[in-house]
């Protein structure tokens, strides 16, 4: 079992009871955050791209916790400047990495990167007996079907805010392509431009797929279990 802790926008933590995996830790300046960056503990920090609302406090948190940063090489250059001597491991699209908690695979995301020469990505994470897909910021793209075929995904964490990422209709279609059983929507309602009625997304997705949508508010935890959504 893995605990999911949501910090608002697209920042969240996965905790398997031994290791803490932090993703896109935009906390300072995040109007939805109910925690301070100084209060977050992490063993690994994953960054999908270098836009400020995803890179966020990653250099500070990584340095404060002596955490290892996982990102594409271009983003790691930012850490060498802002947080020298931080541990890091560079990856690129299609690559896999074994870490103490399990396996991580870096996958494609259809989005700008926020840094010259960089590309945006998502992560498929094998942790605590679960397979969890975090799409990062992305549009809908056809290779989501391949991601679902290669990795038997239990939980997907998907953006639904529209304007900068998939909107609700495309995110519902993504769930069908991924053939995932459980979904957590993120990256919505932080600012007016990405306001969405998440209950509408839940109704749409659950009526068009086998998935169950779990709505998590900022500051809340959710235990991710291997439970059949159709049960």
Image (cartoon, rainbow, N blue to C red):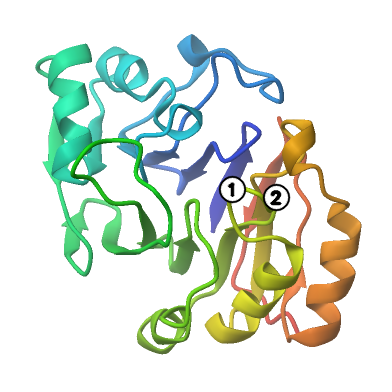
- For image coordinates 90% across by 62% down, the residue present is 200
User: Taking 230 as reference, is 122 above or below it?
Assistant: above
User: Taking 123 as reference, is 171 above or below it?
Assistant: below
**Mark 2 Cα within 10 Å, few/some/many (few <14, many 20+)?**
many
**Nearest to the observer: residue 28 or residue 193:** 193
Residue 135: percent from the left, percent from the top?
Answer: 48, 60
In this figure, which residue is indicated by the disc labeled 1?
Answer: 164
User: Taking 13 as reference, is 31 above or below it?
Assistant: above
In this figure, which residue is indicated by the disc labeled 2?
Answer: 161
- For image coordinates 22% across by 13% down, the residue present is 82
Residue 107: percent from the left, percent from the top?
Answer: 32, 65
Q: Nearer the viewer, mark 1 or mark 2?
A: 1
Residue 83 showing in the rendered view: no
Residue 39: percent from the left, percent from the top?
Answer: 51, 14
Residue 20 showing in the rendered view: yes
**Nearest to the observer: residue 222 or residue 199:** 199
From the image, which quarter does the N terminus lie in? bottom right
Helix, strand or loop status at disc 2 = loop
- For image coordinates 82% across by 49% down, the residue present is 196
Residue 99: percent from the left, percent from the top?
Answer: 20, 53
Location of residue 207 by image quarter = bottom right
Helix, strand or loop status at disc 1 = loop
| Number of on-image labels | 2
Left or right, residue 33 beside residue 197: left
Location of residue 47 by image quarter = top left
**Nearest to the observer: residue 42 or residue 210:** 210
Disc number for residue 140: none
Q: Are marks 1 and 2 in contact (CB under 8 Å)?
A: yes
**Mark 1 Cα within 10 Å, few/some/many (few <14, many 20+)?**
some
- For image coordinates 13% across by 45% down, the residue present is 90
CA gap, disc 1 to disc 2? 7 Å
Left or right, residue 86 beside residue 173: left
């Amino acid at each position: 079992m893995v605990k999911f802790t949501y910090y608002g926008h697209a920042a969240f933590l996965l905790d398997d009871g031994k290791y803490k995996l932090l993703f896109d830790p935009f906390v300072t300046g995040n109007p939805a955050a109910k925690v301070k960056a100084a209060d977050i503990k992490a063993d690994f920090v994953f960054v999908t791209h270098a836009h400020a609302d995803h890179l966020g406090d990653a250099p500070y948190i990584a340095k404060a916790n002596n955490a290892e940063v996982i990102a594409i090489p271009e983003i790691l250059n930012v850490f060498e400047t802002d947080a020298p001597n931080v541990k890091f491991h560079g990856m690129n699209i299609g690559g896999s990495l074994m870490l103490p908690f399990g396996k991580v695979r870096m996958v494609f995301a259809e989005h700008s990167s926020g840094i010259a020469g960089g590309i945006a990505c998502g992560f498929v994470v094998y942790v605590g007996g679960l397979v969890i897909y975090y799409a990062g910021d992305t549009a809908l793209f056809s290779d989501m079907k391949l991601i679902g075929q290669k990795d038997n995904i239990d939980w997907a964490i998907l953006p639904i805010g529209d304007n900068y990422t998939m909107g609700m209709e495309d995110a519902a279609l993504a769930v069908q392509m991924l053939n995932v059983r459980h979904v957590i929507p993120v990256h919505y309602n932080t600012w007016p431009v990405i306001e969405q009625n998440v209950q509408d997304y839940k109704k749409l997705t659950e009526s068009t797929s086998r998935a169950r949508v779990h709505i998590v508010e900022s500051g809340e935890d959710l235990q991710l279990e291997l439970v059949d959504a159709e049960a």
